[in-house]
Amino acid sequence: MAEAITHSYLENTGRYKGILAWLTSTDHKRIGLMYMYAMMVFFIVGVLLGELMRLELFRPGQQFITAQTYNGVFTIHGIIMIFTVVIPGLAAVFGNFSMPLLIGAHDVAFPRLNLFSWYLYILGAAIALSSQFMGNGPPDTGWTFYAPYSIQTHTNVVAAVFGAFVLGFSSILTGLNFIVTIHRFRAPGMTFFRMPLFPWSLYATAWIQVLATPIVGITLLMVIAERWLRIGFFDPSLGGDPILYQHLFWIYSHPAVYIMILPAMGVITEIIPTFAQRRVFGYKAIALSSLAIALVGYFVWAHHMYTSGMSITARWVFSLLTFLVAVPSAIKVFNWVTTMYKGSIAVKPPFLFALGFIILFMIGGLTGLSLGSLATDIHVHDTAYVVAHFHYIVFGGVGFAFFAALHYWYPKMYGRMYNFKRANIAFIFMFVGFNLLYFPQFVLGLMGMPRRYFDYLPQFTLGEQISSIGGFILLVGIIIMLVNLFSRKGGKAPDNPWGGTTLEWSIPSPPPHENFDKLPVITGEPYDYE
Amino acid sequence: MFTEASNFAAGVDQAFKIIFGISIFILIGITTVMITFVVKYRRSKHPKAEQIKDNTILEITWTLIPLAIALLMFYYGYTAFRPQRDFPKDAMNVTVVSKMWAWSFVYPGDKESDVLVLPLNKAVILNLTSLDVIHSFYIPAFRQKEDCVPGKVNQMWFIPTMAGEFWVLCAEYCGMNHSYMEAKVKVVPESEYKAWINALPKKAAEPEGLTIIKKNACTGCHSIDGTKLVSTSFKGIYGKKSIVLTEGKEHTVTVDAAYINSSIFEPDKDIVKGLPKGVMKSYKGIVRDDEVSKIIEYLKSIK
Ligand code: HEC
Ligand code: HEM
Ligand SMILES: [Cu+2]
Ligand SMILES: [Cu+2]
């Protein structure tokens, strides 16, 4: 092979130099990295805001920010984390970077649309963040923008809502791009059931993005219309119905949980076989359970509304469906664990993060059962218990899976390794800190501590303090991890550092611009370690 | 810490115990198996992986067992919840009125209290209402919670089974002082309750102006009892001198009908010194002119 003429995608070969070459690149790998850099910035800001809340909550009473500021902080913390970090999350970063490699494609189906989606993402995020600096002060509605408060508050809700609307478009277009890519751009011979499982999970995700996001889009526009034109959609004092808002909001926002978690499950399904050197157990069950989750996940939204005064029929139907959607998630966990059986397991950092993911995701999922069950949810709904539950899912689940994926594909991305020991230390800090931070919140919620509370009754002090201390241990872990990854100290990475069998490991690290010199022809299943 | 003070609390806790019990078992079980595999099949001990074929029977089993467990949990949650929706016919009714950021309780005979006093072992139905945004009426010790949605009356019922004082908290975020929106439930023997309710004065008919002020949620920012909220209190406002900025120029005005009128319709014209601009929105098209005169009438009355 004529090695000298293939340039890595990290080298600039086009018209532009430096940063411009990145900002105009339609290479899926560069776009993936661009999403990642932006997301890291948002994530760090979000984490710092989280730590700020933890400081304020260290003791009962007001410490150093006012109630109004605190309300603004949890609102923007939630908006940043949900709309700019975990919803685009793994799909935008690794869906872009890795998916075309995994299916043996030169790029996504619509590379320019892909770049456009990134610009929409940046634009949407910028609009959402501008809410902090313009208008009548930071929005104070929580990331859920519940009416009628979101209609009546004088803070700058419109900018935040409009930002989320634009971010939604970015998500829809990415989903569309991935659906077409997966249908049309698989390598010759790669049938759907020969496709690796991360692309499978992205495929299920993409359908949710395309079908569910428009609903929240129009809902958010209705909020804006109601604020500006005083049309009564949701505010009863204008003749609207606040419960309608909740239905519309959750019809999107529950499936959005699956937009976040499905790709996370997908990368874990790539990582475990590689480090166990074993074919994945129950390939079809894992592939189909992604679709099942995506499908049933549409019909459980009102489990967020058990206390809103819905009819008893609505309550039990949504409760039953919620329990059904738990089953395919359980199946995945069994498949992951069984894949380790009689494997040859190397506990390297990506695998360690994957183990962390499985444990935290199980805690998140199992504690979700009491939120799906009617009698128990009535007690813990809108309490710290929910805060703990969703952090276990979105941070323990999606977040840890993101870090697992990052440690897994990092050598492919940069052609360099990182320090394993430091990565492991970072993991330990993060895992311990995480549990100290959020586990007490379960107990606080059971004791009756509501969420979104700037101040609390004295009996909650101990739990809140443990939680705050955990928050700082977690922060230390995150810092060690990021420094380790971005200090550029590791040696050169081989093409296939982990002994993986999927296509991305058959090409150089970092890959050339068009990925494959010659499209690979697929003749068997993806995880073939014979 | 986990006081069970209503007829439903024990049933709810039972459902928790079942769900948590099974969950902890599953969590510990799977984690143990997983860590055992990781240790036992680590590469130094087990250099060559065995490629295990899929096993349909195993997969069907571990689909059906979780399904059965899920249905069981659903069933327990449902049966503990169902009676909470079967409202007794002869229960006493109390209306819960929520607004930013206070609770009040209206008893039969139009008597109002800011403590929810209830007779021990007597069924009570609460009619949950809101004057502004959504709040959520939550008594942790009773394991009860239901939203107070404006424009709608939700209901909740229970029998307090333990004498004592318990917290009422607001569980639905409702703005600045959400975390301070609390009240007490006081459960007392029936004789004590009777004495209390008889002594409770009838709620004075509310002046129309006050109703309008509450309806438009002016009270979220302006108190009527002298406490400072977001803005000045309405108490004694009429006739007092206010230092305002008009187009940046500072001057003093006397609060009279015309000034109140312009404060309501063009709040940004004269800004009270030291208070933020733009926080109070214009009520043009929302408050009618005849309502304004009733507001003024009322403001005159609270000295
Ligand atoms: C969101 C909070 C808010 C609400 C709700 C609100 N106001 Fe205000 N109000 C303010 C603020 C802040 C000021 C001071 C700034 C200004 O003058 O515009 C103010 C000023 C006033 C003043 C002048 C006070 C003085 O001391 O000179 C009057 C009168 C007034 N409001 C009446 C009303 C009435 C009547 C309503 C309901 C129809 C209402 N406000 C609703 C925030 C509010
Ligand atoms: C160090 C990291 C973090 C800390 C210390 C932290 C802390 C907090 C705290 C204290 C709250 C307020 C809870 C309450 O309202 O009672 C909160 C809310 C929230 N957090 Fe985090 N968090 C962190 C990371 C994350 C991540 C990674 C995500 C998502 C991926 C996330 C998503 C949310 C959301 C959606 C809310 C709800 C906001 C709302 O109520 O509107 N957080 N967090
Ligand atoms: Cu949901
Ligand atoms: Cu509240």
Image (cartoon, rainbow, N blue to C red):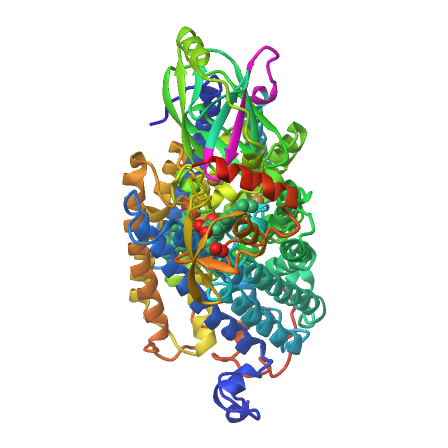
Q: Position of residue B284 (x, y in %)?
A: 63, 52
Q: Is residue A243 left or right of residue B7?
A: right
Task: Depth check: give the residue in front, A38 or A408.
Answer: A38
Residue A497 appears in which quarter of the rendering? bottom left
Decide: is B71 above or below B218.
above
Q: Is residue A180 visible?
A: yes
Q: Position of residue B173 (x, y in %)?
A: 49, 43
Q: Position of residue A371 (x, y in %)?
A: 51, 37
What residue is drawn where x is 48% and y is 43%? Answer: B220
Q: Is residue A473 left or right of residue A508?
A: left
Q: Is residue B288 visible?
A: no
Q: Which region shows up in magenta?
A: B83-102
Image quadrant in which the C terminus of chain B is located: top left
Image quadrant in which the N terminus of chain B is located: top left
What residue is drawn where x is 56% and y is 28%? Answer: B128
B87 part of magenta stretch: yes
Residue B47 appears in which quarter of the rendering? bottom left
Task: Depth check: give the residue in front, B20 or A135.
Answer: A135
A186 part of magenta stretch: no
The image shows a total of numbered marks equal to 0
Q: Is residue A234 left or right of residue A416?
A: right
